[in-house]
């Protein structure tokens, strides 16, 4: 009997939520995400060409320099409140890996800065990005151990 009552409540709740939720245009959202994500990648490629041809940087240094510039620009735009507006417009298109990751580190840090440097800024900075960093480090350690044991290196 309880399952039947719960099911009715769940259906009523879902109907209420769908009634008050704003309707989205999936085609427009997909286009915005594709366009903004692509534009961020175009900016990265432009930076790569400029650093390569103007400053004659090559190889790993070139990749590192482009990454640092994109991280800095993303953090700056997050600090100025611009990246949030880009995210509202572009949705998932603003989560192009490196810029979205920088945004996910800077945004919580800014939100909790009023709690002080240690308890606010430093503790909350990795609230979203922390699990990603931990998973990435642990995965790389596991893969390294597997390669070491199997002698593939």
Image (cartoon, helix red, strand yellow):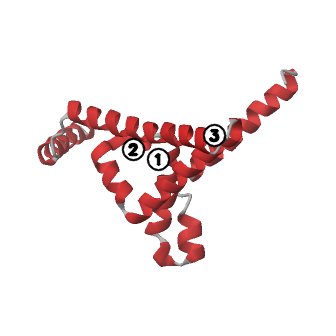
The one of 98 and 62 positioned closer to us in this rendering: 62
Where residue 91 sits in the image (x, y, percent)? 33, 43
Q: Earlier in the sequence, mark 2 or mark 1?
A: 2
Q: Classify mark 3: helix, strand or loop.
A: helix
Q: Which residue is mark 2?
A: 94
Residue positioned 53% across, 56% down in the render:
72
Q: Which residue is mark 1?
A: 100
Where residue 83 sits in the image (x, y, percent)? 38, 55
Q: Classify mark 2: helix, strand or loop.
A: helix
User: Label 2 to label 1, Cα distance in Å?
Assistant: 6 Å
**Res 89 visible:** yes
Q: Earlier in the sequence, mark 3 or mark 1?
A: 3
Task: Say above or below: 114 vs 16.
Answer: below
Give the position of the C terminus as an image quadrant.
top right
Q: Residue 49: name its quadrant.
A: top right
Question: What number is the disc on residue 63?
Answer: 3
Q: Earlier in the sequence, mark 2 or mark 3?
A: 3
Task: Say above or below: 139 vs 80.
Answer: above
Verify CB contact (< 8 Å) between mark 2 and mark 1: yes
User: Label 2 to label 3, Cα distance in Å?
Assistant: 20 Å
Q: Nearer the viewer, mark 2 or mark 3?
A: 3
Residue positioned 69% across, 35% down in the render:
59
Left or right: residue 152 versus residue 46 is right
């Amino acid at each position: 009997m309880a399952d039947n009552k719960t099911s009715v409540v769940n259906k009523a709740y879902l109907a209420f939520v769908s009634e008050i939720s704003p309707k989205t245009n999936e085609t427009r959202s997909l286009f915005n995400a594709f366009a903004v994500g692509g534009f961020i990648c175009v900016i990265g490629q432009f930076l790569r060409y400029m650093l390569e041809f103007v400053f004659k940087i090559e190889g790993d240094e070139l990749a590192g320099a482009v990454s640092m510039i994109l991280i800095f620009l993303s953090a700056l735009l997050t600090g100025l409140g611009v990246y949030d507006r880009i995210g509202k417009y572009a949705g998932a298109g603003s989560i192009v890996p490196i810029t979205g990751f920088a945004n996910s580190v800077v945004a919580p840090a800014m939100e909790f800065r009023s709690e002080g440097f240690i308890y606010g800024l430093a503790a909350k900075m990795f609230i979203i990005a922390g699990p990603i960093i931990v998973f990435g480090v642990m995965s790389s350690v596991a893969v390294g151990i597997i390669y070491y044991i199997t002698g593939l290196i």
